């Protein structure tokens, strides 16, 4: 009988800190023996092996019993948990958005199929798990005081985002995050730090895509405009109450956008599809579609930029 | 979806958690070891799981509210706990707090 008790206590002991092991196990042994004696006294006979097994099961699984003696602290406690949850939602939403954009571009330009969609989902899962793990590690480090914070005590109501008054082009902090992810992706592609989702310009489908030389000439202005948009998005994400700063940045972006469209318009066609092999008809059809679509895109973009210029200009003057 | 019983049980446990410490401290005005403490609490209608009681005793001792010593009784070594001086002071303050809460809540209930 004592063999079962010894095995049970040894299993608990193996999970306890060395410094407290002997002390805790001695106390647990007393607890178990008291229970055994009480049962035996009630039954008027010694416990058999099955009854002792049941009694030790009542005391608890060794992992649970040893765990009760450990530091009584959750990995992420109730104070930090809401911040952890918010952070996880935000990074997952942005990561999903960043994963969907390249897949979307590839699908729209005819460079992807169902396998691409499945591949995007397949690649996103480890990314998502990695992000959740990283957020949990950071939260656990904050919980234990390894990363010092002010306990989220020093915040100002005046720095909270304003309640949107249903204005045009008003965006939330979350919208700002998506905007930021999209522009950073664009910068990555533009500077060739990231591969463009459609892959090589000379595809396996027997077509070559070439861009107007105007894009080469406007390389730096376009990059500068994208960086300005990053700054504007960062203001929205980090300091949503800075309405004037965000409006000023958006006005600058709209002006830059209008100037860009003015320079791109006379340089059309902006994209040229050339048949390399027997795909001549397909290249011509794509060219027709692009030639019809791009001017409309430029006109709509100009109209949106103009409207944004007026609305953000008003916001800049009013400060709300 | 939690049932009414689940919700009640969870709220009951929450309500009991703080009062158990008060009951344990009060019972340790006189020296007891774990098993006898549990029996004493049970006699006055306060049931506590041993799995929770022993770690609680250690935490209270680490906080300086209890003192303990190993002694032999009934041919077995047992760890006896008793309130320390600091424990007595804290118990007195907690008891006042408890009475004040009780007095404030009673008319509401």
Image (spheres, coloured by chain):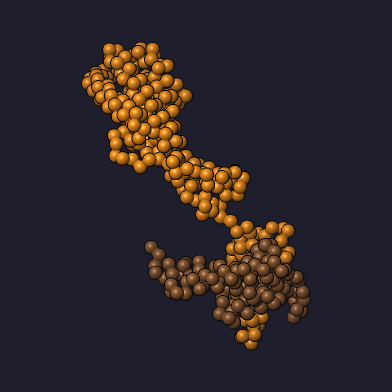
Chain colours: A orange, B brown
Q: Is A47 displayed left or right of A111 in the figure?
A: right
Could you tell me which quadrant the N terminus of chain B lies in? bottom left
Q: Which is more toward the observer, A155 or B33?
A: A155
Let me know if residue A116 appears in the view.
Answer: no
Let me know if residue A194 appears in the view.
Answer: yes
View extreme (bottom): residue? A44
Where is residue A196 drawn, in percent x and y? 40, 25
Q: Which is more toward the observer, A41 or A70?
A: A70
Q: How many marks?
A: 0
Q: Is A166 displayed left or right of A216 in the figure?
A: left
Question: Vertical placement of A77 versus B12: above or below?
Answer: above
Q: Quadrant of residue B39?
A: bottom right
Q: Is A238 displayed left or right of B87 in the figure?
A: left
Could you tell me which quadrant the C terminus of chain B lies in? bottom left
Where is residue B50 drawn, in percent x and y? 61, 72
Where is residue A278 drawn, in percent x and y? 28, 18
Q: Quadrant of residue B84?
A: bottom right
Question: Vertical placement of A90 versus B19: above or below?
Answer: above
Q: Residue at x 31, y 25 (%)?
A: A309
Q: Quadrant of residue A268?
A: top left
Q: Which is more toward the observer, B92 or A246?
A: B92
């Amino acid at each position: 009988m004592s063999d079962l008790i010894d095995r049970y206590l040894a299993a608990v002991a193996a999970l306890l800190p060395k410094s407290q092991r002997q002390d805790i196990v001695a106390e647990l042994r007393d607890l178990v023996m008291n229970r055994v004696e009480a049962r035996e006294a009630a039954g008027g006979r010694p416990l058999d092996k099955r009854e002792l097994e049941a009694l030790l099961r009542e005391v608890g699984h060794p992992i649970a019993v040893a765990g009760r003696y450990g530091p009584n602290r959750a990995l992420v406690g109730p104070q930090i948990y809401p911040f952890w949850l918010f952070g996880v939602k935000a990074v997952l939403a942005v990561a999903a958005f960043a994963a969907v954009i390249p897949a979307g571009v590839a699908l729209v330009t005819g460079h992807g199929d169902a396998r691409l969609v499945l591949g995007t989902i397949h690649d996103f899962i480890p990314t998502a798990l990695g992000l959740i793990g990283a957020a949990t590690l950071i939260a656990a480090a904050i919980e234990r005081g390894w990363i010092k914070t002010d306990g989220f005590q020093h915040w100002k109501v005046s720095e909270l985002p304003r309640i949107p008054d249903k204005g045009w082009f008003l965006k939330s902090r979350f919208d700002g995050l998506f905007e930021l992810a999209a522009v950073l992706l664009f910068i990555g592609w533009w500077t060739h730090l990231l591969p463009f989702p459609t892959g090589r310009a000379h595809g396996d489908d027997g077509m070559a895509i070439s861009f107007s030389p105007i894009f080469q000439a406007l390389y730096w202005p376009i990059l500068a405009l994208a960086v300005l948009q990053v700054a504007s998005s960062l203001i929205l994400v980090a300091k949503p109450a800075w309405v004037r700063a965000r409006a000023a940045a958006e006005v600058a972006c709209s002006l830059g956008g209008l100037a860009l469209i003015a320079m791109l318009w006379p340089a059309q066609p902006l994209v040229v599809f050339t048949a390399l092999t027997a795909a001549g008809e397909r290249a011509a059809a794509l060219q027709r579609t692009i030639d019809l679509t791009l001017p409309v895109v430029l006109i709509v973009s100009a109209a949106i930029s103009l409207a944004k210029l007026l609305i953000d200009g008003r916001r800049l003057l009013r400060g709300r | 979806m939690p049932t009414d019983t689940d919700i009640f049980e969870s709220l009951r446990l929450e309500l009991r958690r703080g009062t158990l410490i008060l009951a344990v401290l009060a019972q340790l005005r006189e020296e007891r070891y774990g098993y006898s403490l549990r029996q004493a609490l049970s006699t006055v209608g306060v049931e506590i799981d041993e799995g929770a009681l022993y770690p609680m005793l250690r935490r209270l001792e680490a906080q300086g509210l209890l003192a303990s010593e190993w002694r032999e009784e009934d041919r077995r070594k047992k760890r006896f706990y008793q309130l320390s001086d600091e424990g007595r002071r804290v118990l007195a303050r907690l008891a006042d707090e408890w009475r004040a809460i009780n007095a404030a809540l009673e008319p509401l209930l």
